[in-house]
Amino acid sequence: MSDTNNIKSLRPQDTLIFACAAIALMLSVPATAQQGLPKGHPPIGNASATGTHTAPPAGNRLTGTVVETMDASSYTYVNVDAGMRSVWAAAPKFPVKVGDRVSVPTDSPMQNYRSDTLDRTFSLVYFAGKIHVSAEGSSASLPADKTAPHPSTGRAQSPPEQSFAGIAKADGGYTVGEFFDSGRALAGQEVAVRGSVVKFSPRIMGTNWIHIQDGSAGADGSNDLIVTSDNVAAVGDVVLIRGAVSVDRDFGFGYSYALLVENASLTVE
């Protein structure tokens, strides 16, 4: 590791960004992880003055192998090879080396993050209160990767907490069910579909992956439309998407899609 990576202090710009990321990570890490925070950094997690901690609900994570790592004062950055994509993550300083497998919480992504301390811009960094490490060669299990856009047959269980009531069909467009019933006949055409976001996977293979549903289903039960877009949405948002239909797309690593809307414009309504 070069000396330029062993930064002795954080500049004010970085401290502010890390503070914002830490606030967003409330309930995500035990009190013991707070020892490495820079002076003045707000607490991370649901830790009381006595050091007790309430475990948070399980969130989205990605797992992979560390291919690059660097320290910047009280923080460690890791570049993680997650199989079909490579991502950066950062957490309060922790021991890790190239070849280790890690599990990274992905609840606090920051896009186009500029670090003056490291003199570089990251297209995406996941800031975390703690990153789990399994040493190289270890057989220890890590939490599963829940962020990848899993291969889809168009059928997925609807989240029980989400309601699709009141989602109107897009003008001149399709319901999700109509989209799947039209199927391959739509290849190459631009379509409009309105639905609710049930899953959002950011910056995988250079784009965002969005699953939308509207409560309808095709004759074969297909109810889950996958869309790629540069736009951002949150789970629960009602969105209008417009994009071109692709068929039989195979991205490798077992990620293949019979129907997919690519490079869509996405409007949160």
Image: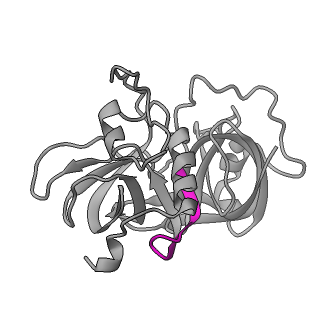
- Residue nearer the viewer, 147 or 65: 65
The spot of residue 84 in percent (x, y) is 39, 65
The majority secondary structure of the magenta stretch comes to strand
Q: Is residue 9 visible?
A: yes
- Image mark count: 0
The residue furthest front is: 39
Q: Is residue 86 magenta?
A: no
Residue drawn 26% across the image and 52% down it? 94
- Residue nearer the viewer, 155 or 51: 51
Horizontal side of 58 relative to 63 (left or right) equals right
Q: Quadrant of the N terminus?
A: bottom left
Q: Is residue 105 above or below residue 208?
A: above
The spot of residue 30 in percent (x, y) is 34, 31
Horizontal side of 35 relative to 9 (left or right) equals left
The spot of residue 254 in percent (x, y) is 37, 60
Q: Is residue 30 visible?
A: no
Q: Is residue 264 above or below residue 237?
A: below
Q: Is residue 174 above or below residue 263?
A: above
Horizontal side of 67 relative to 170 (left or right) equals left
Residue drawn 37% across the image and 24% down it? 55
Q: Is residue 22 above or below residue 83?
A: above
The spot of residue 256 in percent (x, y) is 46, 60
Q: Is residue 117 magenta?
A: yes
Q: Quadrant of the C terminus?
A: top right
- Residue nearer the viewer, 92 or 12: 12
Asked which quadrant contains residue 29, the reply is top left
Q: Please report the bounds of the magenta region as a residue range.
A: 109-121
The residue furthest right is: 171
Figure coloring: one colour
